[in-house]
Image: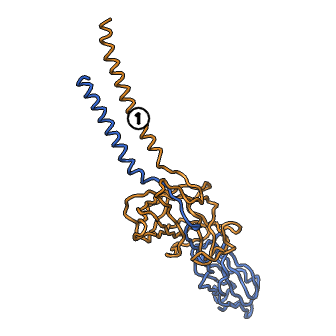
Chain colours: A blue, B orange
Amino acid sequence: MTPRTWRVLGALALIVCVGAGALAAPRTAEAATNWIVGRGGSKGGTGKAVVWSPPASVSAKCAGTITWNINISWSAVPHATSYTVTRHGSGSGTVGTVSAPTTSITDTQLSLIGIGSYYYTITATVGNWTSAASSNTGTVTLYTILFITYCSD
Amino acid sequence: MSNKGRHRAPRSRRGRRTRVVAAIAGAILSASAAFAATNWVVGLDAGSNGLAQSATISNLTITATASPSPSNTLYPGGSGDVVVTISNPNKFPVTITAVNLPTNTTYAAGYSDSALTTAVSGCNASTNASYVTWTGSTGVSGSSHTLGTPLVVAATGQPNNPLTVTFTNEAGMGTSSPLACAGIYFSMPSFTGIAASGGPGSPTSSPATDSWS
């Protein structure tokens, strides 16, 4: 073989060696990587739901001294999307539903219901969750003197 | 004639040389392609014990844990934290880069205690569905979700193994969740798999927080 042939063979041998080295190096590292493993156990983790409590700090106050209207208010419940206020006492029924973040409502229906004593409860709702009724508000009394209706809380 | 013979011989040698070089290059490329096609496991059947590339690699174990208690709690239409413990039985650290989730109709079961031992019948995984699922889950089982920060679980017997991780807001609760689900604990559905690699790495300190995209 001529010297040129030897040079060509030498170059080819070098290419093969370098190529083999380049492949061998990542193979060693690669062999320990890129695998997927499964999980054991039947529980994938622990989550917790909020305790769904009714509104607190409920209050019913006369809108004035001479009035049929009563203002009802309460504290916000985190994550609630709406609240429903229910009247109890001399006449029962739903006062109304308000969307959060509103936390108050005025009962304007009592002139149609009549004088008497009333108190209220409130529930909080999010999704399918409706809380238990809140504790009772204080009692509010409507009475009439000489055809004038007074409110007392 | 003699002139033709003199010129034909070098062309033949060049052609043979070209073929030899091409063959060697082809062999190298073939080996590379074959190698690239190996060492990649791209799926894992739900509920299986896992697949490993080598008999010397053992599966990780992911379980529910009661501590620390999730900070962000679930409510209808909202999301909350999930706390897990990951154990690595291997003699080398394992880096988790992604999780594979069950479908978005695979619901968590409700329990009245953090140890997840007393089931709540009105809030379970089937008849009275909790509608609690993994965030990002889809209609297809095994969807892959890359962790915001890779988790390196130390080798067996080392500190920070097992590794406790809080996945922040990675559970979601549907608005149809029944009131029986309020105030209770959930056993999240198992992952269908995780993407991980073994090898050197600085272990993640326990407890850790993470999330996925």
Does the rendering let one see residue B136? Answer: no
Left or right: where does residue B120 sit relative to residue B147?
A: right
User: Is residue B208 left or right of B129 when viewed as pictured?
Assistant: left
**Residue A52 coordinates in the image, percent (x, y):** 62, 77
- Mark 1 is surrounded, within 10 Å at the Cα level, by few (under 14), some (14 to 19) or many (20 or more) other residues, namely some
- Residue B166: image location, x then y, percent: 49, 69
Farthest residue to the front: give it. Answer: A1
Residue occupying image coordinates x 39% and y 58% = B199
Quadrant in the picture for the N terminus of chain B? top left
Q: Quadrant of residue A113?
A: bottom right
From what the image shows, is residue B165 above or below residue A12? below
Can you say whether B50 is above or below B159 in the image? Answer: above
| Residue reaching furthest to the top | B1
Query: Where is residue B17 shown, x and y percent of the image?
Result: 34, 25
Q: Mark 1 is on which residue type?
A: Ala
The answer to which image quadrant residue A143 occupies is: bottom right
